[in-house]
Image (cartoon, coloured by chain):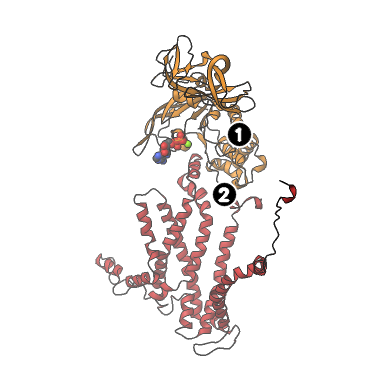
Amino acid sequence: MSATTAPVWTKTRQQPGALARLFDNKAFLIIVCLAPAVGLLMTFLTYPLGLGIWLAFTDTTIGRPGIWVGIENFEFLMEDPIFLNSVFYSVFYTAVATFGKFGLGLWLALLLNQHLPMKSLLRAIILLPWIVPTVLSAIAFWWIYDPQFSIISYLSMKMGLTEGPIDFINTAWPARWSLIFANIWRGIPFVAISLLAGLQTISPSLYEAALLDGATPWQRFRHITFPMLMPILAIVMTFSIIFTFTDFQLVYAITRGGPVNSTHLMATLAFQRGIPGGQLGEGAAIAVAMIPFLVFATLFSYFGLARRKWQQGESND
Amino acid sequence: MATVSVRQAKKVFGSTKILHGVDVEIADGEFVVLVGPSGCGKSTLLRMIAGLENISGGEIAIGGRVVNNVPPKDRDIAMVFQNYALYPHMTVRENMAFSMKLAKAPADVMEEEVKRAAKILGLDALLDRYPRQLSGGQRQRVAMGRAIVRHPQVFLFDEPLSNLDAKLRVQMRSEIKELQQRLATTTIYVTHDQIEAMTMADQIVVMNGGRIEQAGAPLALYDRPANLFVAGFIGSPAMNLLPGRVADGGFRTDGGALLPLPPGANAQAATYGIRPEHLMLADDGVEGTIVLVEPTGSETQVTLRIGETQIIGAFRERVQGRPGDLLRVAPDLSLVHLFGPDGNRLP
Ligand SMILES: Nc1ncnc2c1ncn2[C@@H]1O[C@H](COP(=O)(O)OP(=O)(O)O)[C@@H](O)[C@H]1O
Ligand SMILES: [Mg+2]
């Protein structure tokens, strides 16, 4: 074999085509990949939100495009006792219902985390209130709270506890408490199941170590369970506060804000004024007034979470 | 410091018997290692001593006091878990002080104790870190610190080194041993690693299938294993155990090799045991074919085939053979172990 005939093969660097080069361009790729998401978000989130905020500063009514009126709607609302009452009730409703949901939900989660007979069946039952569509459970509560046909009134009269039917939703305060009770009932599963998931991530050997260190059951809860549950608790609580504050279905289905507007939440009042009432601008202004509260709830969670130094790595030494 | 007595301890999970009546006597200040294959019940026994598992039968006494019905916190023991079980939301200082905090110890006493333990373990600079910010070896030390500050009667360790890399394991092994000698606290240490057991223990308890196979000093177990299980478990590389029978003026293995017997050997012998390090190169020895040569530098391990029997030898000399070559080896007759048909050592 002579050296001159040995085939020499060199890999030629091929110049990539225009299209290939385009797809190698980072800026182009970023735009192409982001476009669908941005488009969807713009259409379904930003546009309605922007429109809502814009409407809040106009005097639009149904059938008449409004003109820019500045903060006139808000000035009017600040003097409106019904609106102020709805702000009060929204905060009260959220505070009391959240407190109830977390108290009972945590208790249930701790219970379900023990070795119980028929544990999985119990867990399934706990989830029921959450699976049932809200409107359905609202109708059930409406029926339970009905002045004439209430099952509770019937039973308590039968047992001689009360003379006549119990007043659930006919006067302001009983109606407010009844709605809060319904909201707690409906919210417990979400809290209980989320916290149960959190409880199950806590290593049993921590409890054993604490047991050997001499901790009583209460001390184990206070020093192990609770701090370890904090991160999940903060997230679940933020979501729960947001959902409760913006609640609409339960109240609208059971009392429609009555009696005499005493149980209006900001969401139900916004709808009431905007759609059946036709005052789109004013309704939008009420809805916009909810935003600061929601931002506050989100910040609460953000800082609640960021404070937990032990979860992060070495960076915050 | 205290003695620990385990008498006929039994453990049943549901209908499964895990421990079938275990007896262990531990002297004051002794370092005892429970060793055995995975799943043999070592952790279960340790957790019964700690009070984390109830005792299905028998009795456990610490310092002469029967503790069957004493809750864990009153047993005066401290335990180091395999995964360390450090409280992730507490700093090293808080982790170590936790038991004292629960006992409402004065702040200056707590600080003093923590400082003392931290000094012993070299954790001084890490007291304000969280467990996440520590390396495996440091976490291991914090777990020990948490045990030390309590001045317990007994230390319990459950495979404390199994999450560390090989080098750190060797280092921590000597640290734990040294610490135990300094504090002179009775210690029960669980491991599945027989080298850990050999190097650390005053007394080794070899367990298998929920029973104790043999208990004794490390070298006693090495020199006179009571049965086939202990013979095969203690020592590395493992002892050659060759089934066969006494015949033709020696021991005829089932594989057909004829091995020399010590004078006056029991004719009932059914298994011939010889440690790899007790085989010698000898021109008048038994001839075998080399299968594998593994030099480690300090010694050479050679796998030989004699008839159908494979046998491993470890020699100080450098063996120059290649697979297929012939090699003559002879067992040190004073170090041959013979086992009867029931698997127990023959006198
Ligand atoms: N809580 C339990 N329930 C049922 N069986 C268990 C339980 N804990 C351990 N066992 C069984 O007991 C045996 C011994 O376990 P263990 O003491 O952890 O072994 P090891 O010697 O590896 O530490 C194993 O077969 C294990 O499956
Ligand atoms: Mg174990």
Determine the chain carrying the residue at label 1: B
Residue B61, percent across and down? 44, 28
**Contact (Cβ within 8 Å) of mark 1 with mark 2:** no
Q: Looking at numbered disc 1 in the image, what kind of residue is underneath it? A: Met
The residue closer to the viewer here, A212 or A75, is: A212
From this viewpoint, is residue A117 visible?
yes
Secondary-structure class at tag 2? loop
Secondary-structure class at tag 1? helix
Is A258 positioned to the left or the right of A270 in the image?
left
Q: Residue at x 26, y 66 (%)?
A: A160
Which residue carries the number 2 mark? B89
Residue A53, percent across and down? 57, 79
Look at chain B in the picture and name its colour. orange
**Residue projecting furthest to the front:** A1
Q: Looking at numbered disc 2 in the image, what kind of residue is underneath it? A: His
Which chain corresponds to the colour red?
Answer: A
Q: Quadrant of residue B14?
A: top left
Residue A132, percent across and down? 37, 67
